[in-house]
Amino acid sequence: MVEVQAIDSRGGNLARGGQDAVTRDDAGDASKTAKADGPESTGSFFTLRRLWPLVVIGAGIAAFFALGLESYFTFDTLKQNREWLLNQVSQHTLLTVLAFIGIYALIVAFSLPGATVMTIAGGFLFGQWLGTAWNVIGATIGATLLFLAARTALGDVLERRAGPWLQRLEAGFQKNALSYLLFMRLVPAFPFFVVNLVPAFLGVRLRTFVGATFFGIIPGGFVYTSFGAGLGSVFDSGEDFSVSGVLTPEVITAMVGLGVLALIPVAVRTWQARRR
């Protein structure tokens, strides 16, 4: 009996020791997890790793105005350098196209003034059809860069801290993201940079954003590029012109109509859901 009790005692001690070891291991794992979570577990979301895209954008905007580069993106500059620009296009076509697309993408990515002038300049330099193509490509690249920067810096933070109303908005937007984005791109009432940022905060997929941006800006881009294609004759005549005259009531009506068509799938899905 004494031997049995001794064995039981040792067994109990071993069992308790095993349980204590498991408890210590669990505590160690929890501690490691807390350390691995790092700043996010303590609520400090705004680390340099997360915010570096915003730092780059802020530095780019500051440098743009500090160097006075906004003075180059005017119609007067385009008019004064008309011959030189057209010669560059004819003699160095590929290099000029790549430079134009790159400059356009940077303007959109940094949300700088001058996108409208660049769009019109695209038609002036490359013609109606090629100008539209280079404008759309440059604008899509720039919008995608800004979208990725916003999603990297703030997208996850806002998603984790979103309240119930924002979660419902996010879920509804994601369900019909393509239609909503096409509508916002087609209707000229929404600022371009705002449409680049909002989808990043609502968890829209990159592929959906790029597709909706590319196809959604074609109609408006074509209108402004067509105006630019005839800008040479305006320069020759010496007449005054205004960019505000590009979007005539007829053009606005047509673009709004296209935007409404983009929302038809949303209306159909909502009607089917109510019937079910």
Image (cartoon, grey):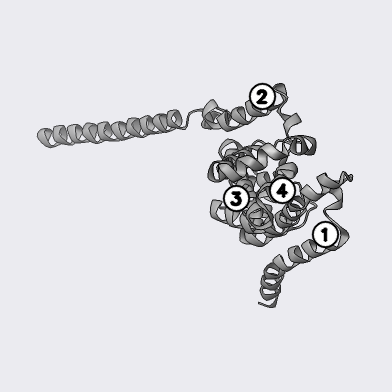
Disc with the residue nearer the chain's start (2 vs 3): 2
Q: Quadrant of the N terminus?
A: top left
Name the residue tied to disc 4.
124
Residue at the spot 58% in from the left edge and 30% down from the top edge: 51
Disc with the residue nearer the chain's start (1 vs 4): 4
Q: Secondary structure at mark 3?
A: helix
Name the residue tied to disc 1.
252
Label 3: how many Cα within 10 Å (few below 14, some 14–19, many 20+): many
Q: What is the quadrant of residue 76 in the picture?
A: top right
Q: Secondary structure at mark 2?
A: helix
Of marks 4 and 3, the one in the foreground: 4
Q: What is the quadrant of residue 223 in the picture?
A: bottom right
Badge number at residue 41: none
Which of the pair 275/53 is nearer the observer?
53
Give the total number of marks visible in the rendering: 4
Name the residue tied to disc 3.
137
Label 4: how many Cα within 10 Å (few below 14, some 14–19, many 20+): many
Position of residue 191 in the picture relative to residue 24 (left or right) = right
Residue at the spot 66% in from the left edge and 46% down from the top edge: 196
Three-letter amino acid code of the residue under disc 4: Phe
Position of residue 241 in the picture relative to residue 131 (left or right) = right
Which x, y percent locates residue 40?
Answer: 53, 32
Name the residue tied to disc 2.
63
Which x, y percent locates residue 260?
Answer: 76, 66
Of marks 1 and 4, the one in the foreground: 4
Three-letter amino acid code of the residue under disc 1: Ile
